[in-house]
Image (spheres, rainbow, N blue to C red):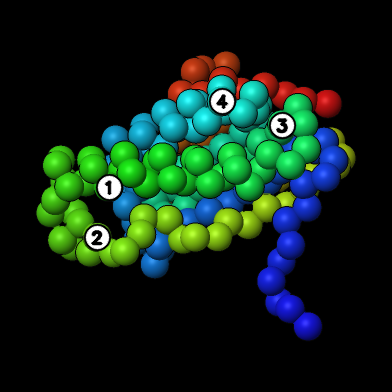
């Protein structure tokens, strides 16, 4: 029996995705790597006609709620997001923060090769997952209130402040 979790992408629903920096290194501690990650998300969302319902960038992992207008797009979307961001992030660290790579080691890859995806079919589950990702920085003690973490869509939902990517609710 295989222990490999199969990602289902055969219906229109929101995908709750999580992926991590290789070896859980805190390479997203700096603001600029987070900006790069969001910039690439913007580009890939445009290329795939995807919508972002919510996200949070943590020091060593990312959560996002993504919707596509057609099925079968998640794997290619995630591949491109991780590939493009990895190339840009590595370049930034090499030129702008080489001491950081020395401390954490550059490693053979930036992101872990796999990602976790959970399919969300119901509004109540979507709201639960959105709250879960927004509370992540609070649970970790990075901020007192979710909307205070500027690397999350919580500011959009609570204060209607821009968060670096367009946030759209889907029904």
76 vs 104: above or below: above
Is the residue under label 1 in contact with that under label 2 (CB below 8 Å)? yes
Q: Which mark's residue is nearer the viewer, 4 or 1? A: 4
14 vs 163: above or below: below
**Residue designated by label 3:** 68
Q: Nearer the viewer, residue 82 or 136?
A: 82
The percent coordinates of residue 21 (x first, y second) are 41, 57
Q: Residue at x 20, y 57 (%)?
A: 101
Work out whether mark 3 precedes mark 4 in sequence or the reverse, and give the earlier one. 4
| Real-space CA distance between mark 1 and mark 3, rounded to the nearest whole angstrom | 28 Å
| Real-space CA distance between mark 2 and mark 1, rounded to the nearest whole angstrom | 8 Å
Describe the element under mark 2 as helix, strand or loop: loop
| Real-space CA distance between mark 3 and mark 4, rounded to the nearest whole angstrom | 11 Å
| Real-space CA distance between mark 2 and mark 3, rounded to the nearest whole angstrom | 33 Å
Work out whether mark 1 precedes mark 3 in sequence or the reverse, and give the earlier one. 3
Q: Nearer the viewer, residue 100 or 129?
A: 100
Q: Residue at x 47, y 52 (%)?
A: 61
Is the residue under label 3 in contact with that under label 1 (CB below 8 Å)? no
Is the residue under label 4 in contact with that under label 3 (CB below 8 Å)? no
Work out whether mark 4 precedes mark 1 in sequence or the reverse, and give the earlier one. 4
73 vs 7: above or below: above
Q: Which mark's residue is nearer the viewer, 3 or 4? A: 4
Describe the element under mark 1 as helix, strand or loop: helix
**Residue designated by label 4:** 47
The 10 Å Cα crowd at callout 2, few under 14, some 14 to 19, many 20 or more, is some
**Residue designated by label 1:** 90
């Amino acid at each position: 029996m295989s222990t490999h979790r199969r990602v289902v992408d055969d219906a229109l629903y929101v995908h709750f995705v999580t992926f991590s920096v290789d070896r859980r290194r805190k390479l997203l501690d700096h603001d600029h790597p987070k900006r790069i990650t969001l910039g690439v998300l913007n580009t890939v969302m445009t290329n795939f006609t995807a919508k972002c319902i919510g996200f949070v960038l943590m020091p060593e992992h990312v959560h996002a709620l993504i919707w596509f207008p057609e099925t079968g797009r998640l794997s290619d979307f995630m591949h491109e997001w991780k590939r493009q961001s990895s190339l840009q992030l590595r370049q930034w660290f090499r030129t702008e923060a080489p001491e950081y790579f020395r401390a954490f080691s550059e490693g053979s890859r930036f992101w872990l090769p796999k990602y976790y995806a959970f399919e969300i079919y119901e509004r109540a589950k979507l709201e639960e997952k959105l709250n879960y990702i927004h509370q992540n920085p609070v649970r970790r003690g990075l901020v007192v209130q979710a909307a205070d973490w500027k690397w999350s869509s919580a500011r959009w939902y609570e204060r209607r402040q821009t968060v670096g990517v367009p946030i759209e609710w889907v029904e």
